[in-house]
Amino acid sequence: MLAFSFNSPLVFEHSFIGYSSEHFFILSFFCLSGLIYIRSLGKLNLERQHRILFFSAIVLALVQLSRIPILAINGQFNIETDLPLHLCNFLPFAMIWSYGVRSEKIWSVMFFWIMLGCSQANFTPAVRESLFYYDAIRYWVVHAFLVILCLYPAINCNWKIKHIDIWRSLGWLHIVSAIIYSINLATGGNYMYLNAKPAGTNFYSILPEWPYYILSLEFVILALSYLLFGIFSVIARNKNELSPKSAY
């Protein structure tokens, strides 16, 4: 009988390798799953769509939180590394808030964090374990499905991002970063990678060393936010032009 623990894989016996067949399979799986989720949910009335978005965010938060008791049971919990304080790890809780109160303003701030942060985490993953380790499953479910949940209101609920949202998002990111940095100093952790680069080959590898990579990220985030805003503005404009005009 196969045991499902934090350290025991169900199938593979190797560490995760970026841009391997496994990586492309995972990305393809979540792209297809996201398409099915968005199309299927879009057929429901708006009230049911909002409720399902809310409960989907709760499920993601529970998946993320489950890591703590599993690590504790295995005697592996470390306050320096295992609190849900990395950006993508606490975003499910922010999405619960956004969808719970149905706030387009909160969502628009999270939009840039998720689309830039989680997309980067999907294409240059920091996960160490391969499928089907528990932590690999948790990593991909949270990071990939956050992107799907984030895109949904823009596609089916007509929620929009505005130019001011770029600066609101950046401003709140600074506030959150200051709080997390204080927690890092208290715990000795490196949450949100504010004290050092993450290990392995990833987006941070092309940036200068600490603390200069943090300053570099300011410009990278701002440039990518404007690019993302431009892309979605064009999509929204074309969508409006293709929509049937009211006779009234």
Image (cartoon, helix red, strand yellow):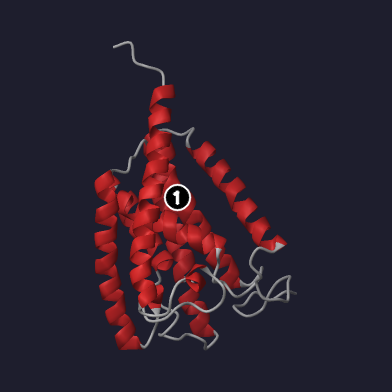
Q: Please provide percent x and percent y for residue 203.
A: 50, 67
- Residue type beneath disc 1: Leu
**Looking at the figure, which quarter contains the N terminus?**
bottom right
Could you tell me which residue is drawn at 39 percent across and 50 percent down? 54
Q: Is residue 10 left or right of residue 27?
A: right
Return the residue at label 1. 149
For the residue pair 27 and 101, the one nearer the viewer reads as 27
Q: Position of residue 129 (x, y in %)?
A: 62, 74
Please, is residue 153 above or below residue 6 in the view? above
Q: Is residue 121 above or below residue 8?
A: above
Q: Quadrant of the C terminus?
A: top left
Closer to the camera in the image, 118 or 149: 118
For the residue pair 182 and 224, the one nearer the viewer reads as 224
Q: How many marks?
A: 1
Q: Taking the image as drawn, is residue 109 in sight?
A: yes
Residue 46, horizontal then vertical, whole percent: 38, 35
Residue 103 visible in the current orientation? no
Q: Tell me: 169 left or right of 15.
A: left
Q: Residue at x 39, y 80 (%)?
A: 210
Q: Is residue 200 left or right of residue 175?
A: right
Dot 1 falls on a residue whose secondary structure is: helix
Q: Looking at the picture, does residue 49 appear above or below residue 31?
A: above
| Residue 108 place in picture, x, y as percent | 31, 49
Instruction: Tell me if mark 1 has few (under 14), some (14-19) or many (20+) residues whose alpha carbon lies within 10 angstroms of its own.
Output: many
Side of 100 relative to 16 (left or right): left
Image point (45%, 86%), residue name: 78
